[in-house]
Image (tube, helix red, strand yellow):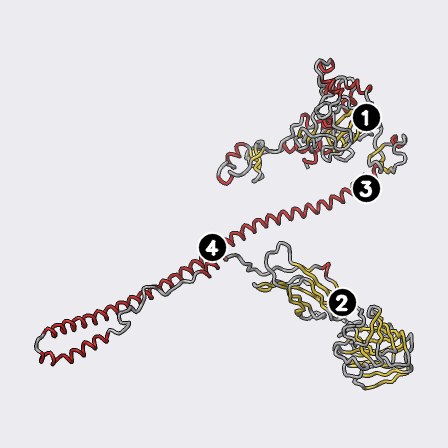
């Protein structure tokens, strides 16, 4: 609350606050510093505020050697207030401005402690007060609000023309007294002395007051307390005398405020037009005579009630904001905890990958070792074999050379044949490839690490959580006739991916749920439901991780009675529809069938058909049929329809081309045929001009039926739906019917 009690100019608590026309408040001393006065002739505007075109009078006043300028000094506020002008002169003390437009006319140059920029105090040139009356006329004064920058003109009363905010002044006084009491009661909360020592510091984190000794003993400036912030305890504001005039009413109550224009009169009425309290003398003088004036007490109670009502809204928002802050703080903690959990999970997953890679590396090294040992064995075997053969060949060669050296022909010829054969066999042993290595020095092993490297580079987080609960948008869920429309959305700030939704609906009797839609859309309409039935619906979301939880159930009630028209999509091509598909005729002389857009499987339903045209005594047929009824012959000639066909004198019931129950009473132009389908009793009844045509035409009928009609070009009928069952034939309503 303290910010509301500070002046926007000086930044201190209000002193003698006045109410500006814009409803903002400002201290009276501060108002004197920001008031602006501009002579109409602008004879003495200083060059500081008009650098481009200085006024001649101002230039002359500032010229060297001017007698007026030589002896001029700035008059302080206190001295001016005490001078010959008195209080009015002090209120009218003003500053020079660039213009006298009356709106946002001052140029900021200084900044107050509260962040508002105000004009510096510029003294008027010497002789200006005397020159003003002789110049262009009286000076005009204005005051610019430091908050909204709207200007208000001052009249001859000056700042006294603004009302003093006594209520704000009293609140400031109570606030100062409360702070003074709090400062007096600021005692150490840990002292074991009696009485406790005065508090020296307040720990903002611990929210505990400490004296100097207890601070050193219980709150050292080290360890976990090192980051705590110690501030001075709550103290009395330094305003002299306890805040100006705040103590005037202490002990004796507050003086009733008097009228600003009539000091001896108390406020007793409230002018609604001027939005200000007035006294009886203000009304008698005529200033508020024609205004809307009401009793002060009644308006006080009314405005207090309005303020209380507005405060209730602000209080609710403040409560929501506090709850939201608690939610955000809990969110911070959850984020911190979840972040640590995810870090631990990431480290564990990466360590598992590293372990798997290490194991795979050992396997690959084993394969390389086996390949190397195999190659070495093959080469060593080849070396041993070649060495043995080389030794044998070398010995044979040496022996043959010795044999060749012999000069005995007979002895040579004795062994030459056998020796030649041995040499030839030895030569044949060195076949092609025998002197080539069986293995190469290269290893035919290539490690394909590129896919793994790509996988490592693409390694990222995927959402493994189930989708959250969808939110049903009740404002978009609706029913029409025997169809329902449902809409839903995901909660805000949801990052779990959703691949689709599953919408489930029960059977209208509180039975089991069944899936009626699976897909990515968030809006779905289900047709063909039962009339006058209550359905429960719920939806859930799914992704690659699985199916999320169900939403809250929404209850939907279908219409009590059916509204439908003729269906152009299923009608015979010779049928002609008009009047928004409510009127039907035919282009053919043969009977053609048209169905209604509604389908019935339970409940009691009634509709009527008005005969608009009836020529040459045709035989139209009225009734019900299944969706696959034959449409190029009279209704009722196949086993898919149950009908009453009628001429101008009598009627017959027909099903499977079987005629039954001939009844007197036909139709003509203007006649009305009623059809009553009671699926609770499983029968069908017909009416002509309100008269029932015999007993129920058909009984024991079950299944799904659609309203049906067959006619030719000599007949035109108009369909009327959404009708209540006639009272004379109305059946008692069954549960969930």
The span from disc 1 to disc 4 (Cα, nearest Å) is: 79 Å
The span from disc 3 to disc 1 (Cα, nearest Å) is: 32 Å
* Depicted 372 relative to depicted 197: above or below: below
Q: Which residue is mark 2?
A: 558
Q: Which numbered marker is on residue 302?
A: 3
Q: Residue 468 in the image: x percent, y percent?
A: 61, 59
The span from disc 4 to disc 2 (Cα, nearest Å) is: 56 Å
Q: Residues within 10 Å of mark 2 (few under 14, many from 20)?
A: many
In terms of sequence position, does the residue under pointer 3 or pointer 2 come before the other?
Answer: 3
Q: Mark 3 falls on what kind of element?
A: helix
In terms of sequence position, does the residue under pointer 3 or pointer 4 come before the other?
Answer: 3
Q: Mark 2 falls on what kind of element?
A: loop
Residue lying at the far left of the rendered structure: 408
Q: Is residue 660 left or right of residue 124?
A: right
Q: Which numbered marker is on residue 157?
A: 1
The span from disc 2 to disc 1 (Cα, nearest Å) is: 74 Å
In terms of sequence position, does the residue under pointer 2 or pointer 1 come before the other?
Answer: 1
Q: Which numbered marker is on residue 94?
A: none
Please name which of the two marks, 3 or 4, marks the residue nearer to the observer. 4
The quadrant of the rendering that contains the C terminus is: bottom right
Q: Nearer the viewer, residue 360 or 217?
A: 360
Q: Residues within 10 Å of mark 1 (few under 14, many from 20)?
A: some
The span from disc 3 to disc 4 (Cα, nearest Å) is: 67 Å
Q: Which residue is mark 4?
A: 347
The quadrant of the rendering that contains the N terminus is: top right
Do we see residue 194 in this rendering? no
Q: Mark 4 falls on what kind of element?
A: helix
In terms of sequence position, does the residue under pointer 1 or pointer 4 come before the other?
Answer: 1
Q: Residue at x 64, y 33 (%)?
A: 182
The span from disc 3 to disc 2 (Cα, nearest Å) is: 47 Å
Q: Residues within 10 Å of mark 3 (few under 14, many from 20)?
A: few
Evaluate if marks 2 and 1 touch, with contact meaning CB atoms under 8 Å apart: no
């Amino acid at each position: 609350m303290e910010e509301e009690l500070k002046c926007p100019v000086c930044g201190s608590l209000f002193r003698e606050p006045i109410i500006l026309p814009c409803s903002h408040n400002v201290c009276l001393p501060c108002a004197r510093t920001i008031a602006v006065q501009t002579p109409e002739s602008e004879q003495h505007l200083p060059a500081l505020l008009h650098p481009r075109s200085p006024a001649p009078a101002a230039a002359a006043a500032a010229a060297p050697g001017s007698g007026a300028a030589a002896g001029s000094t700035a008059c302080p506020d206190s001295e001016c207030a005490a001078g010959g002008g008195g209080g009015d002169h002090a209120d009218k003390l003003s500053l020079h401005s660039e213009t006298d437009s009356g709106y946002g006319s001052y140029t900021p140059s200084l900044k107050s402690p509260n962040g508002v920029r105000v004009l510096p105090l510029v003294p008027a040139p010497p002789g200006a007060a005397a020159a003003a009356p002789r110049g262009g006329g009286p000076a005009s004064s204005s005051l610019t609000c430091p908050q909204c920058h709207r200007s208000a003109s001052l009249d001859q009363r000056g700042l006294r023309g603004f009302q003093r905010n006594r209520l704000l002044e009293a609140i400031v006084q109570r606030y100062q007294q409360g702070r003074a009491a709090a400062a007096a009661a600021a005692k150490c909360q840990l002292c074991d002395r009696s009485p406790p020592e005065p508090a020296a510091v307040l720990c903002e984190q611990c929210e505990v007051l400490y004296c100097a000794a207890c601070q050193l003993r219980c709150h050292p400036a080290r360890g976990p307390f090192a980051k705590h912030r110690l501030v001075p305890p709550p103290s009395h504001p330094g305003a002299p005398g306890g805040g100006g005039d705040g103590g005037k009413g202490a002990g004796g109550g507050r003086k009733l405020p008097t009228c600003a224009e009539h000091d001896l009169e108390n406020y007793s009425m409230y002018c609604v037009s001027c939005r200000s309290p007035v006294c009886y003398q203000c009304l008698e003088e005529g200033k508020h005579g024609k205004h809307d004036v009401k009793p002060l007490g009644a308006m006080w109670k009314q405005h207090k009630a309005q303020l209380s009502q507005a405060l209730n809204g602000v209080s609710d928002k403040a409560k929501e904001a506090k709850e939201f802050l608690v939610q955000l703080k809990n969110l911070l903690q959850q984020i911190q905890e979840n972040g640590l959990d995810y870090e631990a999970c990431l480290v564990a997953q990466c360590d598992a990958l590293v372990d798997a890679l290490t194991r795979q590396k050992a396997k690959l090294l084993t394969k390389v070792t086996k390949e190397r040992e195999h190659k070495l064995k093959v080469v060593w075997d080849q070396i041993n074999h070649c060495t043995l053969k080389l030794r044998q060949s070398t010995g044979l060669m040496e022996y043959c050379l010795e044999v060749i050296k012999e000069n005995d022909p007979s002895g040579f010829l004795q062994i030459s044949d056998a020796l030649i054969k041995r040499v030839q066999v030895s030569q044949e042993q060195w076949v092609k490839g025998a002197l080539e290595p069986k293995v190469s020095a290269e290893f035919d092993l290539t490690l394909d690490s590129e896919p793994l490297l790509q996988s490592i580079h693409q390694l990222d987080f995927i959402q493994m959580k189930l989708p959250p609960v969808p939110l049903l948008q009740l404002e978009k869920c609706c029913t029409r006739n025997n169809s329902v429309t449902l809409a839903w959305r995901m909660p805000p700030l949801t990052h779990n991916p959703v691949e689709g939704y599953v919408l489930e609906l029960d059977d209208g009797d509180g039975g089991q749920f069944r899936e009626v839609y699976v897909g990515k859309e968030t809006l779905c309409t289900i047709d063909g439901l039962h009339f006058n039935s209550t359905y429960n619906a719920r939806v859930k979301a799914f992704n690659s991780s699985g199916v999320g939880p169900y939403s809250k159930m929404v209850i939907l009630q279908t219409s009590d009675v059916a509204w439908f028209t003729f269906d152009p999509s299923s009608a015979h091509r010779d049928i002609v529809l008009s009047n928004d598909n409510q009127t039907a005729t035919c282009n053919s002389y043969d009977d053609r069938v048209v169905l209604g857009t509604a389908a019935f499987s339970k409940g009691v339903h009634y509709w009527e058909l008005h005969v608009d045209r009836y020529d040459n005594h045709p035989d139209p047929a009225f009734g019900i049929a299944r969706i696959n009824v034959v449409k190029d012959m009279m209704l009722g000639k196949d086993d898919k329809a149950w009908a009453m066909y009628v001429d101008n004198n009598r009627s017959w019931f027909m099903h499977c081309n079987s005629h039954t129950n001939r009844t007197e009473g036909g139709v003509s132009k203007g006649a009305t045929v009623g059809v009553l389908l009671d699926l609770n009793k499983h029968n069908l009844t017909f009416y002509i001009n309100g008269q029932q045509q015999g007993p129920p035409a058909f009984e024991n009928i079950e299944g799904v039926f659609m309203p049906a009609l067959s006619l030719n070009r000599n007949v035109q009928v108009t369909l009327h739906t959404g009708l209540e069952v006639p009272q004379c034939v109305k059946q008692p309503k069954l549960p969930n019917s």
